[in-house]
């Protein structure tokens, strides 16, 4: 192999000597990839914590603990509480407030409690789903951004052939190689984002189902306890 050709086709050399539009495409894809990995790790730790705290709270709640004691504990450390704990705290707080009002039927009290938990549930779900839209965007758009850089690089490579009398592989290879680097970077940016998005969407859906089930089950518990107290 020609040493000079090998040097011309080295990855660093191709990136440095790429045309400005292709370099901009590579820079955009590099930034998107770095941001994707940042959000992937942030979301990984956040969902791991959410799952751990949820498991711990469910074990405590269904272990027969005193609801009033749990409420006081969660209310005291609400900022550091888990998603399901904040749903529980919002529902029980609303339940106690409505019970103190005279003239309200049981259905009104339970419906108000359920609405309070639903509102908190939606806020918690929005927090869990934060940054997923960015991962979805990177996963779907990056290949096309890389393809744009590829098309542009190949177009410039063939335009360069118009100025020479005899075209050779050595003349066109660097331009095509730099174009293909843009495609590779697009895939490198998109694949982790798509995998992370699919994985975290699945994990969030499972947590969401558990929180919705808790809302209904806790509402039924409060309803039964209120009926017994009457």
Image (cartoon, rainbow, N blue to C red):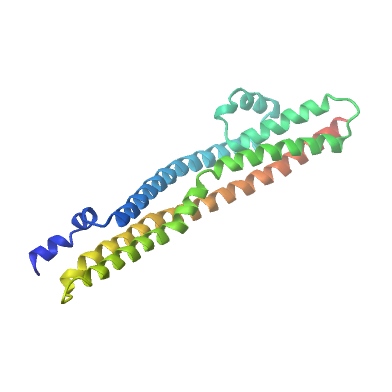
Residue visible at 50% across and 55% down? 198
> Can the viewer see residue 64?
no
Residue at image location 65% in from the left, 23% down from the top: 72
Q: Where is residue 22 in the image (x, y as percent from the top left)?
A: 31, 57
Q: Percent from the top left, x then y, of residue 184?
A: 32, 61
Indicate left or right for 1 with 126 as reference.
left
**Taking 94 as reference, is 204 above or below it?**
below
Q: In which quarter of the image is residue 87?
A: top right
Is 172 located above or below residue 221 in the figure?
below
Using the image as rendered, state which of residue 216 and residue 169 is in the foreground: 169
Residue 116: image quadrant is top right
* Figure label count: 0
| Percent of width and height locating residue 111 | 80, 39
Left or right of residue 99: residue 125? left
Judging depth in this view, the residue of 136 and 161 nearest the camera is 161
Quadrant where the N terminus lies? bottom left
Q: What quarter of the picture does the C terminus occupy?
A: top right
Q: In this view, does 94 lie above or below 18?
A: above
Please state the horizontal and vertical placement of residue 215, each as a whole percent of the image: 70, 41
Instruction: Say which of 19 and 190 sits in front.
Output: 19
Answer above or below: position of 62 versus 176: above
Q: Can I make out residue 218 in this image? A: yes
**Which residue shows up at 47% across the image and 51% down it?**
135
Instruction: Determine the residue located farthest toward the bottom in the rendered image.
Output: 166
Residue 211: image quadrant is top right
Q: Kindly give the residue lying farthest to the right in the view shown.
A: 103
Is 186 situated left or right of 204 in this image? left
């Amino acid at each position: 192999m020609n040493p000079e050709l090998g040097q011309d086709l080295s990855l660093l050399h191709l990136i440095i000597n790429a045309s400005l539009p292709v370099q901009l495409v590579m820079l955009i894809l590099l930034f998107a990839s770095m941001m994707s990995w940042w959000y992937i790790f942030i979301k990984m730790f956040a969902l791991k914590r959410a799952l751990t705290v949820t498991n711990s709270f469910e074990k405590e709640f269904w272990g027969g603990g005193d609801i009033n004691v749990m409420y006081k504990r969660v209310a005291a450390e609400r900022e550091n509480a888990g998603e399901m704990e904040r749903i529980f705290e919002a529902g029980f707080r609303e339940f106690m407030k409505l019970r103190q009002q005279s003239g309200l039927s049981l259905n009104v009290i339970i419906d108000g409690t359920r609405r309070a938990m639903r509102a908190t549930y939606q806020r918690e779900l929005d927090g869990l789903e934060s940054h997923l839209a960015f991962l979805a965007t990177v996963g779907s758009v990056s290949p096309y951004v890389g393809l744009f850089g590829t098309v542009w690089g190949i177009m410039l490579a063939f335009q360069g052939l118009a100025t020479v009398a005899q075209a050779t592989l050595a003349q066109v290879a660097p331009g095509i190689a730099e174009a293909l680097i843009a495609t590779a970077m697009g895939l490198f940016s998109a694949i982790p984002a798509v995998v992370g998005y699919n994985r975290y969407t699945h994990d969030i859906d499972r947590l969401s189902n558990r929180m919705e089930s808790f809302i209904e089950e806790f509402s039924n518990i409060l309803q039964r306890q209120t009926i017994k107290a009457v």
